[in-house]
Amino acid sequence: MFSNSKAERWLGLFCVAFALVLIFVWIPHDVETGAFQKVRRRLTIGDSLAPMVAGVVILLGGVLTYLSPSENAKTLDRKAILWVCLVVLSVAVSITIMRWFGPLVTELLTDQTYRSLRATAPWKYVGYVSGGGALVYLLIGVATRSWSLKYLLIGLLAALCMALFYDLPFEDLQLPPNGDV
Amino acid sequence: MGIWDHVLLGFQAVFLGTEAFSIFGLPISVTVLMVLGGFLLGIAVGATPGLAGPMAMAIALPILISIFGFSSDAFLPVLGFLVGIMKGATVGGAVPAILFNTPGTPDAYMTTLDGWPMSKKGEAKKALRVAHFSSASGDTFSDIVLILCAPFLAVLVETYLDLPEKTGLLLLSLAFIASVIGNSVGKGLISMGLGLLAAMVATGEDFYPRLTMGIPSLNEGFPIASAILGVLIIGEVFRRLEDMRYGGVQKQGQAVASASASSRLGWAGLRPLLPYIGRSAVIGTAIGALPGIGSTLAATLGYSTGSTRHEKTKAPDAPSFGEGAPEGIAATEAANSSVSGANLIPVLSLGIPGNAAAVFLILAMDTIGGFNPGPSVFRLSGDGVNTEMVLAFGLFTTMFLANGLNWTIGGLFMRVVGVMARIPNHLLLPIVFLMTLTAIYVQETSLAAIWITLGFGVLGYLMRKLDISPLPFVIAFILSGKLEDTARQAFAATGADPFFLFKSPVALAFVVLTVVVVVANLRKSSK
């Protein structure tokens, strides 16, 4: 476990390292023109200059954070990293359900493709309501550590209301994942 | 056409624009309806702890764009709705602060100090009336200052600032925001640098999309809605859900106090509040006009200034600040409400957003197109009509319309929405999360945008955990393109002079001020 000021110094060092990699590795390899370039014999600002300025700002911020660390600053602990992983995993699972559950259901229950049914109720809601419901349920679950069936119903109901809210009045709007399939 | 012709056209655009319906032959325009809808929604959102005005603006924007499209006819209804939310949320934030000791918005925290004790004494309705009167007064004052200042500031900028000076001014604004927000100048600069960098992905003048690392889905750059909503909204939802996981779920809306008969607030009750409202309105307006300093600081300063005066002038038996003094509510609410109008001074005159709400107004202007906030808005073009100026005065009209609604029905609606504070956050936040992702998908129609939003959400969460304010990131993201374009043009216009920022006295002054702002804040934070 770091002291707060030590963690601040690590943050400063990380930003300095990131800025140096940005300025000396990333920008030279991933931007076609330099900081300045000649176009029709006229010197103009190239595409590299602005990212370099951004890199210098991050570098300066990193140096200042390293040199004047705060004792009272918050730090990033293992719990926070675990929490991020948990939330990202929950969202990833939900989006996967959202993307694939509709096609799976249409595959099982009809002889048409999901693409041909993606503008037809109820098929067009299947992916969104299932994935959206799962998202709300999982987030409530990880936040409260409680996996009540009531929360699943709340999630599904919320997703259904939102689907109807977006879809009924606005014909040209597409709910996820219908624009991607 | 002169200024007054533009004012009149702006007024007409609001009241005589596309008709929604008519009452006894009197046409009610879509814009008027949208301002009303936004205002009522804003009060409800402000009264809901866990939600905030910018959150509602963020979710509403893609829906509004889907309804009204990208034509110039969309400008006033969309901006009117957002302005309504912005103003309504400030008023609504006081409701749970007074009734439940829970600030609906961060800037209403100081309202709890006197609002809750008044509620406990059975004076909840009176406290709400004080909050409403003070908030509406501060808001109106701030709007008047906006209308008087923004055009003149814009004309000054247009008259005296050329491209190098405008580049210097943008640098100064960014440095000011990075230095003032948060507790650390270094972290402010990191946030700003990351915002600049993120906005530069896949942009530039060359055919090759820069900084994409060869990833095809980044060839169009990061969608602005994904970046801003991700860092501001999703990151905040992650953090609050984490607080619940490790800190427990708090019950909302406990212990409503009953109102006593002494809820009336006549002239005799209002008159002692006026000095507090006046001072706080000036403080809030001055703070609101500076980019980056939010309404929370205005509320704190207004409260502490009011407290000093109150201790000197109060009757011996009158409650002190913190013990249920109506003057405390007045000082806080007038200060935080007067920020909202003044915040638009840098937006409209310079194109620089000062806070999260202004970010979404600029985002709306940017998405709809046809209106480029900045000096060109207030430029008279001979006999012709400057459409941007008409829209600007239309926007001012919507602000006054929202004020009028605040004075007339705001207080009544405020007293009705107390029930919103009972919505539990552990159910509300995941639904807000889903709503945000849906709003982004509706606009971008791509799951890649959702993944990008999630990525920015993680960034926003990490920034909060490390005590790095996300606001410099967002403002830098918005201003990055403008800064680069202005610098390119200034460089070309000065004959490729690499020292163009140091040749004109005004540009040089801006550069020197940039350094001074950073150094001064650095010294302040190291003490």
Image (cartoon, coloured by chain):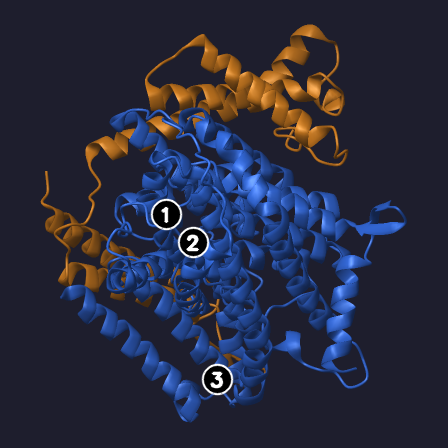
Chain colours: A orange, B blue
Question: Could you tell me if the residues under marks 1 and 2 are in contact, i.e. CB atoms within 8 Å?
Answer: yes
Query: From the viewer's perspective, is the residue at label 3 or at label 1 nearer?
Result: 1
Mark identifier at residue B102: none
Q: Position of residue B518 (x, y in %)?
A: 28, 72
Chain of the residue displaying label 3 = B
Residue at x 71%, y 52% (from the top left corner):
B77
Q: Amino acid at mark 2?
A: Glu
Chain of the residue displaying label 1 = B
Q: Is residue A39 visible?
A: no
Indicate whether B274 appears above or below A128. Answer: below
Tag 2 or tag 1, which sits nearer the N-term?
1
Query: From the viewer's perspective, is the residue at label 3 or at label 2 nearer?
Result: 2
* Disc 3 secondary structure class: helix
Q: Position of residue B462 (x, y in %)?
A: 31, 43
- The quadrant of the image that shows the N terminus of chain B is bottom right
Q: Which residue is mark 2?
A: B333
Give the residue furthest to the right.
B25
Q: Are marks 1 and 2 on the same chain?
A: yes
* Disc 2 secondary structure class: helix
Chain of the residue displaying label 2 = B
Residue at x 15%, y 50% (from the top left corner):
A72
Indicate whether B294 appears above or below B91. Answer: below
Q: Quadrant of residue B262?
A: top left
Relative to B210, B517 lies left or right: left
Q: CA distance from mark 3 to mark 1?
A: 44 Å
Q: Which residue is mark 3?
A: B164
Q: CA distance from mark 1 to mark 2?
A: 7 Å
Q: Amino acid at mark 3?
A: Pro
Relative to A68, B246 lies left or right: right
Judging depth in this view, the residue of B282 and A9 nearest the camera is B282
Q: Which residue is mark 1?
A: B111
